[in-house]
Image: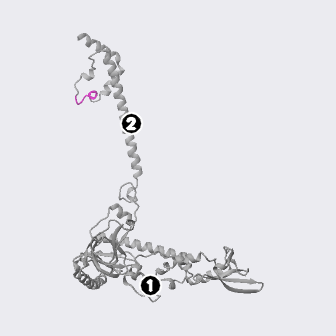
């Protein structure tokens, strides 16, 4: 177990855990802590408590001190300066004619860094803008591109329900929302009715998803054949999920009757066929008409493509920001980011520059093979020459050939190539033996 406090730095933001050490904190007080962005002033939303070690992301940072009145006043002064910085940055964006929308300006507590949040449809080259802002504010400038959901979370607003937006009040993270949740809750598939202020599917669809999944498991499907408590069979026409009521269409000859029954009093006889009933077909047809031009699958695919596009935009923005600050990525990564295919011939070279690499590699391999064969042949010849000379030495002590006794001159080819002399001596053994016997006589 570890003792922590929960601190939030902006309204509706994520709660971060810190080590309070021996200091006393209560909910609603302020603390000065050190984060990855620098020194920050945050509001305590979770009082001191002990939690499991697995719930804490190590290393757990410690609180610097309890915020006093001077710190709180300094934070308020930063908020007033942020409004002026927002106005100046908007004017600079107009001067540079950049296609971007400024959302918010933010100062760190120690005033060592200033952050500007913006949205844009694509990548924006804001390097000149960063230089101008740095010359005005005399501090480190950082521009971050965010999505439409983050923009709505920062700005806030009123939803279609008449209440403040969930994301700007209590939601710390964005949960994934799909069109299947709207189907599960029997909502209209009209995008205008299930989309929020940001233009995406409403986050509140996730709130009751588990409840609807649990209740729908107890109900038959539309078009199923069921048996009522009085023993009659009929087809399910509609469902009331929250009240757990089933509306059944009963046909007896030419008479048709519609009645509501509790879900626990009916018995399922047969599941709906793949084609579906007429009522189900009409319902799906109406739902498709309400959904507009595309189906739910198209809507989900469009959401996924939008998320990937926003991620690519954020990555490109970070890369441009690093370039503006003087950081240069390795050549290989730059070419890969530009779309060039990088092969293993040379790091960082596109395929067009490495054409013929395989041919050159095969040619070099053949050259090495020829050199190895020549080296093995020479070693074998030297080894054979040494063996023949040893045999001759065993026949007579103190034997030396005429070529070996010659002084090695620069022009003497045999002195420069002893193997050649040995090979010639092996071809004339009788002459060598006569010379050897003459030398023995003289000795």
> In the rendered view, does 68 fall on the left or right side of 97?
left
Q: Disc 1 or disc 2, which is closer to the eye?
A: 1
Q: Residue furthest right?
A: 253
Which segment did they paint magenta? 409-415
Q: Do the residues labelled 1 and 2 touch (CB within 8 Å)?
A: no
Q: Can residue 128 be seen in this view?
A: no
Q: Residues within 10 Å of mark 1 (few under 14, many from 20)?
A: some
Q: Which of 335 and 409 is in front in this view?
A: 335
Name the residue nearer the viewer: 125 or 418.
Answer: 125
Is residue 73 visible in the rendered structure shown here?
Answer: yes
Label total for image:
2
For the residue pair 158 and 399, the one nearer the viewer reads as 158
Q: Label 2's element?
A: helix
At a point 27% along the width and 17% down the height, the residue shown is 399
Q: How far apart, in angstroms, are the residues tagged by discs 1 and 2?
A: 78 Å
Q: For residue 197, which numbered disc appears in the image?
A: 1
x 40%, y 87%: residue: 157
User: What residue did someone put label 2 on?
Assistant: 373
């Amino acid at each position: 177990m570890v003792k922590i406090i929960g601190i939030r730095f902006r309204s509706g933001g994520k709660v971060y855990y810190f080590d309070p050490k021996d200091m006393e904190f209560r909910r609603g007080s302020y603390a000065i802590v050190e984060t990855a962005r620098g020194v920050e002033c945050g509001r305590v939303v979770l009082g001191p408590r002990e939690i499991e070690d697995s719930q804490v992301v190590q290393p757990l940072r410690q609180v610097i001190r309890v915020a006093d009145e001077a710190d709180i006043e300094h934070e308020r002064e930063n908020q007033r300066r942020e409004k002026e910085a927002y106005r100046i940055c908007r004017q600079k964006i107009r001067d540079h004619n950049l296609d971007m929308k400024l959302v918010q300006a933010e100062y760190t507590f120690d005033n060592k860094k200033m952050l500007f949040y913006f949205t844009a449809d694509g990548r924006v080259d804001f390097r000149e803008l960063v230089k101008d802002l740095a010359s005005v504010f005399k501090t480190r400038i950082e521009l971050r591109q965010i999505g439409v959901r983050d923009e709505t979370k920062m700005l806030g607003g009123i939803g279609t329900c008449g209440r403040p937006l969930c994301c700007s009040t209590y939601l710390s993270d964005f949960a994934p929302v799909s069109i299947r949740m709207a189907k599960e809750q029997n909502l209209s598939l009209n995008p205008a009715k299930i989309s929020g202020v940001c233009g995406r599917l409403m986050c509140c669809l996730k709130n009751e998803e588990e409840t609807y999944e649990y209740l729908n498991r107890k109900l038959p499907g539309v078009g199923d054949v069921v048996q009522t408590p009085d023993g009659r069979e009929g087809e399910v026409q509609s469902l009331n999920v929250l009240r757990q009521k089933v509306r059944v269409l009963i046909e007896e000859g030419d008479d048709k009757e519609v009645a509501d029954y509790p879900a626990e009093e009916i018995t399922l006889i047969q599941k709906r066929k793949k084609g579906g009933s007429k009522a189900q077909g009409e319902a799906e047809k109406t739902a498709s008409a309400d959904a507009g031009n595309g189906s739910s699958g198209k809507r989900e695919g469009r959401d996924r493509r939008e998320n990937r596009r926003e991620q690519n935009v954020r990555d490109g923005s970070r890369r441009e920001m690093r370039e503006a600050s003087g950081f240069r990525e390795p050549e290989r990564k730059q070419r890969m980011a530009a779309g060039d295919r990088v092969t293993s011939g040379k790091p960082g070279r596109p395929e067009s520059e490495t054409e013929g690499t395989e041919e050159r590699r095969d040619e070099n391999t053949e050259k090495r093979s020829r050199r190895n064969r020549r080296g093995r042949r020479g070693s074998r010849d030297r080894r054979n020459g040494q063996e023949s000379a040893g045999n001759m030495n065993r026949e007579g002590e103190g034997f030396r050939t005429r070529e070996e006794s010659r002084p090695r001159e620069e022009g003497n080819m045999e002195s420069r190539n002893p193997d050649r002399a040995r090979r010639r001596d092996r071809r004339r053994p009788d002459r060598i033996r006569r010379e050897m016997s003459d030398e023995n006589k003289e000795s």
